[in-house]
């Protein structure tokens, strides 16, 4: 939920582009600032940019954010806008941005992922859907020269507010695009993956965002000083999660306390899930996500799937590009880290997907091309427009772990066979080879050779492929394992190993589909990786311990991928039990980890079995 993804104030823009944006806005728009009343009397601060052109009526793009609509003041204009908002401004849209209830200059009390009220009984029963409805009602009747049509868009936390806009939507809201939307924090977005805490995401976010606000303010959230650029070192020094409040938060950060007091799925988390409420939708929907978004890839995929299942016949589309979190809003999208995609994917998304979508529903523009899912296929590096996601013609194909570090499509032979490693929470496996505080967005496709060399990482690899293999959909890890403790994390990574011959050629450059930004011989590209907190292997609401050293089945689903392993490449699977500090450490003991003390963390020995009767494997959705 990075706060640069705002629609305005995109810090990554070059100075010349930012100056051009500001000059264009001053010349072509009139800015107003209003407090829009909600049904319960609370007023929400709203910034409105209305085109000076009064010869025609204009549609409205509405963006609601908890991250501030700065700069404040009628004479202040943003020094940069994101790719899509720039396009809407040049096409004469009315741009509306709003501080959500209880944030910055809006009145009221803020609530994180405020629960939906299914059957409001009075004007006091408000949620983000009612606030959006009341905002739309005011805009239609009070903003001059609007054409009666509203579109809503937003990325990350603003993506959540976009999803809420579609629920019981105002009739003027004709199209909605939730992008990387916060959808279900306990299941796979931002803070938890399969019950394991994404430590820097939660701590770093709430160390700034989570402090109470006594009254409306225009000043930014406080910045937390880690005292070091080394996140690994900082969180190792922090130790157990129970140290957070006595050392840093002092019980003043309300949602951290909520996370700590609800360590498993319960009614608290169920009330904050958007998925059950994505039904009876009327607006056309465009869900957007990135294949390398560590924060809300889960939300984009699963919110789209929920809307698809619960709204037969709805215009409900999905876009997934080769992007990190919100990357499609800024820059050109031609690279991520050292990998190049051979085209400017951000520009293509803006010009060929998002803007035509809103133009059609808000300006009676031409119908966009027909598709259900616009998906970028990595490996071959090309866009594909599909009539279904996941595609209907995939075949679930088992890829088996074998003795000797091998990986193959045939089941292992009979006989006892396993690999083991010692996982030490005092020396956890890093999630990245870099020394940094906040994560590098490119870590999701980072070279994994640094992890292959660790004794606490198991590595399995196929022979060089004799044909291309394309996977399209979710990946399942289906293992038989044991641990010497009573709890354990299982991290599984699916990796594309590039041929060593790329190193000697030195000629492959960013020139088209399938090409790369520099020689990448032997590069171990992370395609997908995820974690299961072992005690949640059967249920997120009813954790249970492992029986020490007993062979135990564990099965969990990694997020979808759309990737082609090219001929001559190898497929690799890595297995480990720490991924630090991206994932908090498991003490190896069945307990509430938020209450664990430093003395509770112990080394454990893990085994992964690979015999005929205990055939650990990953299930790949292979496309013809």
Image (cartoon, rainbow, N blue to C red):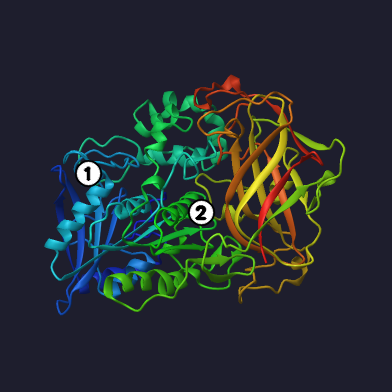
Q: Position of residue 377 (x, y in %)?
A: 59, 66
Helix, strand or loop status at disc 2: loop
**Farthest front residue in view:** 312
Element under disc 1:
loop
Query: Would you place residue 145 above or below residue 575 in this image?
Result: below
Q: Mark number for residue 172?
A: none
In the image shown, does 190 or 149 lie closer to the viewer?
A: 149
Q: Is residue 597 above or below residue 231?
A: above
Residue pictured at 30% horizontal, 46% vertical: 220
Q: Quadrant of residue 92?
A: bottom left
Question: Of 310 and 267, which appears nearest the observer?
Answer: 310
Q: Say if 443 sits above or below 147 in the image.
A: above
The answer to whether residue 526 is left or right of residue 31 is: right
Of the numbered discs in the image, which one, if any, rests on residue 217? 1
Exactly how many numbered labels are in the figure?
2
**Lower sequence index among marks 1 and 2:** 1
Residue 213 position within the rendered picture, expressed as x and y whole percent measured from the top left = 26, 37
**Alpha-carbon span between mark 1 and mark 2:** 31 Å
- Of the 4 image quadrants, the one containing the C terminus is bottom right
* Residue carrying label 2: 293
Q: Position of residue 317 (x, y in %)?
A: 43, 63
Q: Position of residue 63 (x, y in %)?
A: 29, 57
């Amino acid at each position: 939920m990075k706060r640069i993804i705002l629609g305005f104030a995109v810090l990554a823009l070059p100075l010349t582009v930012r100056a051009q944006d500001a000059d264009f806005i001053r010349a072509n728009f009139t800015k107003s600032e209003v407090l829009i009343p909600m049904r319960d009397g609370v007023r929400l601060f709203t910034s409105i940019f209305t085109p000076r052109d009064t010869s025609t009526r204009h549609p409205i793009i509405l963006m609601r954010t908890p991250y501030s609509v700065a700069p404040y003041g009628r004479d202040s204009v943003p020094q940069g806008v994101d790719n899509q908002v720039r396009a809407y401004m040049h096409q004469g849209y009315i741009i509306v941005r709003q501080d959500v209830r209880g944030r910055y200059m809006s009145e009221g009390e803020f609530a994180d992922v405020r629960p939906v009220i299914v059957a409001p009984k009075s004007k006091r029963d408000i949620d983000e859907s009612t606030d959006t409805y009341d905002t739309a009602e005011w805009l239609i009747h009070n903003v001059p020269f609007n054409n009666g049509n509203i579109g809503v868009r937003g990325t990350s936390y603003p993506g959540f507010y976009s999803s809420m806009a579609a629920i019981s939507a105002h009739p003027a809201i004709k199209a909605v695009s939730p992008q990387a939307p916060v959808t279900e924090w306990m299941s796979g977005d931002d803070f938890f993956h399969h019950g394991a805490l994404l430590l820097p995401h939660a701590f770093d976010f709430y160390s700034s965002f989570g402090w109470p606000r006594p009254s409306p303010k225009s000043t930014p959230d406080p910045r937390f000083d880690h005292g070091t650029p080394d996140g690994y070192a900082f969180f190792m020094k922090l130790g157990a999660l129970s140290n957070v409040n006595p050392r840093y938060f002092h019980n003043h950060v309300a949602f951290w306390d909520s996370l700590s007091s609800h360590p498993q799925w319960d009614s608290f988390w169920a009330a904050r899930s958007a998925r059950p409420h994505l039904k009876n939708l009327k607006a056309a929907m465009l869900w957007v996500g990135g294949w390398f978004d560590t924060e809300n890839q889960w939300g984009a995929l699963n919110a789209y799937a929920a809307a698809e299942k619960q709204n037969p016949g709805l215009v409900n589309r999905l876009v997934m590009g080769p992007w990190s979190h919100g990357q499609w809003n800024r820059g050109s999208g031609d690279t991520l880290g050292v990998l190049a995609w051979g085209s400017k994917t951000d520009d293509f998304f803006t010009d060929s997907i998002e803007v035509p979508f809103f133009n059609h529903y808000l300006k009676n523009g031409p119908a966009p091309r027909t598709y259900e899912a616009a998906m970028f296929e990595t490996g071959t590096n090309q866009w594909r427009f599909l009539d279904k996601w996941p595609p209907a013609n995939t075949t679930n194909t088992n890829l088996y772990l074998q003795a000797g570090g091998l990986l193959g499509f045939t089941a292992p032979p009979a006989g006892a066979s396993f690999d083991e490693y010692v996982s030490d929470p005092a020396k956890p496996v890093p999630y990245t080879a870099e020394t940094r505080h906040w994560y590098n967005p490119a870590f999701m496709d980072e070279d994994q050779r640094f992890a292959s060399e660790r004794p606490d990482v198991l590595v399995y690899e196929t022979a060089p492929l004799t044909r291309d293999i394309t996977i399209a959909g979710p990946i399942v890890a289906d293992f038989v394992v044991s641990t010497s403790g009573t709890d354990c994390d299982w991290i599984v990574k699916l990796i594309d190993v590039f041929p060593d011959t790329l190193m000697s050629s030195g000629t492959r450059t960013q020139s088209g589909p399938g090409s790369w930004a520099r020689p990448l011989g032997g590069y171990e590209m992370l395609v997908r990786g995820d974690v299961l907190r072992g005690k949640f292997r059967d249920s997120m609401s009813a954790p249970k311990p492992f029986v020490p050293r007993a062979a135990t089945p564990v099965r969990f689903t990694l997020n979808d991928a759309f990737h082609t392993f090219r001929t001559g490449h190898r497929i690799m699977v890595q297995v480990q039990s720490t991924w630090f500090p991206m994932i908090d450490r498991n003490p190896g003991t069945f307990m509430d980890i938020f209450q664990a003390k430093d003395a509770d963390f112990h080394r454990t020995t893990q085994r992964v079995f690979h015999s005929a009767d205990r055939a650990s494997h990953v299930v790949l959705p292979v496309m013809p």
